[in-house]
Each structure stands twice: as structure tokens, then as C-alpha cells.
Image (tube, rainbow, N blue to C red):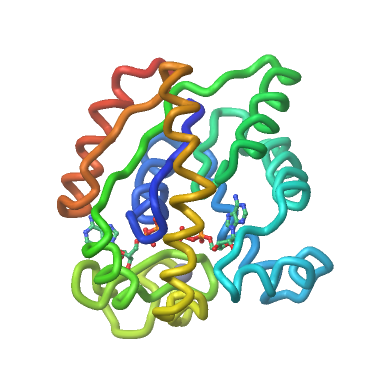
Amino acid sequence: MRIVLLGPPGAGKGTQAKKISEEYEICHISTGELLRKAVQENTPLGKKAGEYLDRGLLVPDEIIDGMVKDRLKMLDCERGFLLDGFPRTLGQAESLDGFLKEEKLSLDIVIKIQVEQAKLIERFTGRRTCKNCGASFHIKFSPPKKAGICDNCGGELVIRKDDEEETVKKRLQVYETQTTPLIDYYDRQKLLVTVDGSKAIDDVFEDIKSYLEGVKS
Ligand code: ADP
Ligand code: ADP
Ligand code: ZN
């Protein structure tokens, strides 16, 4: 199965992506997580990307496209993949289409997770992210078993630097201008479905699964 998750920052893409990739045994590619890891490890990619992340701006397409292609070529993506946070611009979507065509592959479905803005803000303010595996928790809606510690890997939970109010506003704005054109782009390709992301985490997952059952693996 080859899936793209679309939706504003804070909609729950990462949360649902973890559940989907486990259930269907496909690789989960989060460009945000890959970038944060690169920044943390101070790799050449991290040095280039760090400032964009801190300012809530998109990292240039050339950097992202190369990073995603390298990841998609890895063996664990052979069974299928789930893209979380990519593509985010029309340029990235076209680049992905080009890559898939070369590999004689195609996307099965694009799932848009819809959440209204007021709700998004409340999600950012309580978000805690594992420094080690990237899993998201929420102090109110999805608390870890032990405060400050990741349920999955025991890693330390931190507040993302770009989750502060000013940067969040910028990221929401960037989503509106640069990413929303993808909704039309995938709708025209008859790939788009929309789920109501304002429901509880498990209910959103059930809705996603009902769409995925209709997609052959
Ligand atoms: P969120 O889950 O809140 O939407 P992400 O973890 O996906 O945030 O992304 C965090 C940051 O990483 C973005 O604000 C941006 O700077 C960078 N980033 C992630 N994915 C992309 C992408 N596909 N293109 C450009 N920049 C990206
Ligand atoms: P994204 O990857 O789209 O930025 P996350 O998956 O990191 O979003 O979710 C943002 C925050 O909201 C996290 O703190 C997460 O635990 C919480 N969250 C995710 N889905 C829901 C939901 N359906 N209801 C309430 N909180 C949620
Ligand atoms: Zn973890």
C-alpha cells in the first residue's frame, strides 16, 4: 500500500501514521522527523535545514526531494510506504510522481486529516515529542504512561522548538499558502479522501482503516 497523509501541522498525521504503519506493516516516512534527526546529529543536511525548521519555513524542495527518494529506495519500503509531511508543495508532489513513474509504481490513496484551527492550537500547546523515536504524545489527550518518558522506547519527551506560538502561526500560514494546493492536485487524480481529525485518536484511526480496507495491498 502506498499512502500520503495530508493535513495541517498538529492535525494528528504523525499519531495516525504510527498506527497505520504498524497495522499494515509498511514503512513510515516522516520528513519532519528525518529533518529533526539530521539537525540533532548535526549532519550536513541538518546544518542546511536547521534554520528553516526554527523559523517554521519549508526546507527547499531540492533538499527534501533527494532525502525522500533515498529513503524510498530502502528495502523496508518494498511492501509499501506511508508519507507523513511530504509532499508539502506542488513541486514536491510532481517530483514524487516522477519518481514513482520511473519505478513503475503509483499512489493508492491520499488521506487528508481535517481539523479546524482552534483545535490545532490546543494540540500544539500540549504536544510532547520523543527525542529518540519521534513519537507524539499530548499532556491531556494522549498522555504517556510515565510523565516525560516515551511509551515506545523510553526516550525523553521534549517540547519541539518550533511548537512555540509565533512559529506555529507561521507554520499554519505556510500550510495554507504552500500545501493546500495539493488538495486539488490529488482530488483531480481521484486519490483524495477526507477524514474528520477532530474525533478521538482511535476513532480517527477507525475511519482511516475503513478507507484502507477498500484499497488493495
Ligand atoms: P508537523 O507534524 O507539525 O506538520 P513536521 O514534523 O511535519 O511538522 O515538520 C516540521 C518542519 O520540518 C516543518 O515546519 C518544515 O520546516 C520541515 N519540513 C518537514 N517536511 C517538509 C517538507 N516536505 N518540505 C519542506 N519542509 C519540511
Ligand atoms: P502532526 O504530525 O499532524 O503535526 P501529531 O500527530 O504530532 O500531528 O499530533 C499533534 C498533537 O495532538 C500531539 O500532541 C498528539 O498527541 C495530539 N493528537 C493527535 N491526534 C489527536 C486527536 N485525534 N485528538 C486529540 N489529540 C490528538
Ligand atoms: Zn520514543
Whether residue 23 appears in this view of the structure is yes
Residue placed farthest to the right in the image? 44
**What is the x, y in percent for residue 157?**
43, 80
| Number of disc labels | 0
Picture quarter containing residue 216? top left
Residue at (48, 37) in percent of width and height: 181
Which residue is at a point 45% across and 82% down the rendered structure image? 158
Q: Nearer the viewer, residue 208 or 175?
A: 175
Q: Residue at x 44, y 75 (%)?
A: 163
Where residue 77 sits, quadrant-wise, is: top right
Q: Position of residue 156 (x, y in %)?
A: 46, 82
Q: Position of residue 6 (x, y in %)?
A: 43, 42
Up/down of 49 relative to 12, above or below: below
Instruction: Indicate left or right for 198 with 33 as reference.
Output: left
With 65 as the anchor, is 84 left or right in this view? left
> Residue 116's image quarter?
bottom left
Residue 157 seen in render: no
Q: Is residue 101 above or below residue 110?
A: above
